[in-house]
Amino acid sequence: MRARRWASGRARARVATALAAAVRMAVISPAPLEGDEVRAAVRVATSEATVRERIGALGHGGKLLVYVLPEAWMIPDLPLDPPSSPDLPVTDRGHHVPFDFDHTRYRVLFTRPQSHDPDPHGEAIVKRAYGREPIVVVRVDTAAGQITGIDAPPPHVRWGDISTPLL
């Protein structure tokens, strides 16, 4: 296992893949992932026509805010798991972020950022977003180069209408 340096909060969230598809996508991860790991996860997640159709339904020029998380991670601040999900670990806040995770299995959450900026580009997609509309969650195995599942995300985070950070 490679040694990783851990930071906290927003410092951990980084724009790992600058931009893709003519600056219409910002990809971030709250996990300490290398850029190649993030790019591989997004590449595999968008390899199937079903996923491309769902995210393409935004129309030409639609922006995407994409989150890449290790498959084992549970972060209730992101619309990944319904509150009643049997996969949620029993913790005091629903968070489960093991330091030793499989660096080949990820969940990729595609969202439409909500912003007052009519045409944000690059990091502005993240910085100017005040919310997000979940589109699809794609489970990927980057070692095999395969999608292992496509899920409809819950309409909101575990905390309901309580504001949570975009990360």
Image (tube, rainbow, N blue to C red):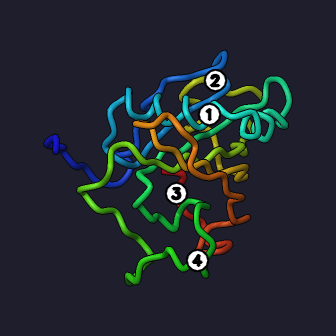
Badge 2: residue crowd in 10 Å (few <14, some 14–19, many ≥20) = some
Amino acid beneath label 1? Ile
In space, the residues marked 2 and 4 are separated at their CA atoms by 35 Å
Identified by mark 2, the residue type is: His
Label 3: element kind:
loop
Q: Residue furthest front?
A: 144
Name the residue tied to disc 4.
Answer: 85
Q: Which circle's residue, 2 or 4, is located before the other in the chain?
A: 4
Q: In this view of the protein, which residue sits in the foreground, 118 or 59?
A: 59
Image side of residue 82 versus residue 167, left or right: right
Q: Residue furthest left?
A: 3
Query: Quick one: SS at disc 1?
Result: helix
Q: Are marks 4 and 1 in contact (CB under 8 Å)?
A: no
Q: Earlier in the sequence, mark 3 or mark 2?
A: 2
Q: For the residue carrying disc 3, how many other residues have a C-alpha within 10 Å: few (<14), some (14-19), or many (20+)? A: few
Measure how far apart labels 3 and 4 are at the Cα level.
22 Å
Position of the N terminus by quadrant: top left
- Say whether marks 2 and 1 touch (CB < 8 Å): yes
Labels 4 and 1: the sequence-earlier one: 4
Q: Position of residue 18 (x, y in %)?
A: 49, 24
Q: Is residue 43 left or right of residue 32?
A: right
Q: Residue at x 51, y 68 (%)?
A: 76
What residue is shown with label 3?
165
Q: Choose the circle earlier in sequence order: 3 or 1.
A: 1
Q: Secondary structure at mark 2?
A: loop
Which label was assigned to residue 125? 1
Dot 4 alpha-carbon crowd within 10 angstroms: few under 14, some 14 to 19, many 20 or more? few
Numbered tag placed on residue 1 in the rendering? none
The residue indicated by pointer 2 is 121
Q: Label 1 crowding class (10 Å Cα cut-off): few <14, some 14-19, many 20+?
A: many
